Image (cartoon, helix red, strand yellow):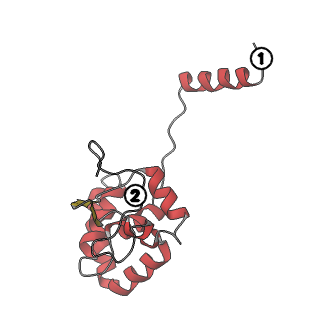
Amino acid sequence: MRAGMFLGRSLVVEPGGAGHLDGQHLYAGATVTLNSHVFRLTHADEFTHNYMEEHADEFPQANYNVALDEARRCLGHHQLTDLLHQMTPRDPEKTGFAPTSVVVSALLTALKGSKLSLQQVTTLARRHRRLQANPLTRQHLSHLAALHFKRHNFD
């Protein structure tokens, strides 16, 4: 390794020399060894989650159908009912919605004995979430209008 460079642009060999690390090895909950240093991947940003879910063939841990089949296999009717009861106190306004982090932690608890990774549980929760639209402020609207006029040469 060159001084001052931990990892350059090159293929990273798996420990044991079985092959190279690729997308199927990189997901939330994975433990990866790079240059004799062990890293645990704990989460990803929104762009990364979207990319992985759109390219599920390259990232099997972000494949919704695989995660759903495994969750169905592990959870029975009684466990699903218990899961709903766990989330009910987290919704004091009775809107029928819970924050994604609450859903992920409840699913992780319910699926503790399964083979589902953190990435797969997050994929399940993300698929069934409801995004709240940000309200459009006056300042933001005037900025968008000015940008539109500028693009169309309206000075």
Residue 73 higher or lower than 16, as above or below: below
Residue appearing at x 37%, y 87% in the figure? 73
Q: SS for tag 1?
A: loop
Q: SS for tag 2?
A: loop
Q: State the image quarter where residue 26 is shown.
A: bottom left
Residue appearing at x 42%, y 65% in the figure? 123
Question: In the displayed image of the protein, which residue is found farthest to the top?
Answer: 155
Tell whether 61 sits left or right of 50: left
| Position in image of residue 107 (x %, y %) | 31, 70
Tell whether 56 sits left or right of 21: right
The residue singled out by tag 2 in the image is: 97
| Camera-side residue of 69 and 87 | 69
- What amino acid is found at the position of numbered circle 2 in the picture? Phe
Nearest to the eye among marks 2 and 1: give it.
Answer: 1
Residue 17 higher or lower than 92, as above or below: below
Residue appearing at x 42%, y 52% in the figure? 9
Q: Which mark is residue 154?
A: 1
Residue 59 higher or lower than 6, as above or below: below
| Position in image of residue 85 (x %, y %) | 28, 70
Residue 95 visible in the snapshot: yes
Tell whether 129 sits left or right of 146: left
Q: Quadrant where the C terminus lies?
A: top right
Structural distance between the alpha carbons of marks 2 and 1: 44 Å
| Camera-side residue of 115 and 101 | 115
Residue 76 visible in the snapshot: no
- What amino acid is found at the position of numbered circle 1 in the picture? Phe
Residue appearing at x 33%, y 56% in the figure? 43
| Position in image of residue 87 (x %, y %) | 30, 64
Q: Which tag, 2 or 1, sits closer to the chain's start?
A: 2
Q: State the image quarter where residue 97 is shown.
A: bottom left
Tell whether 108 sits left or right of 21: left
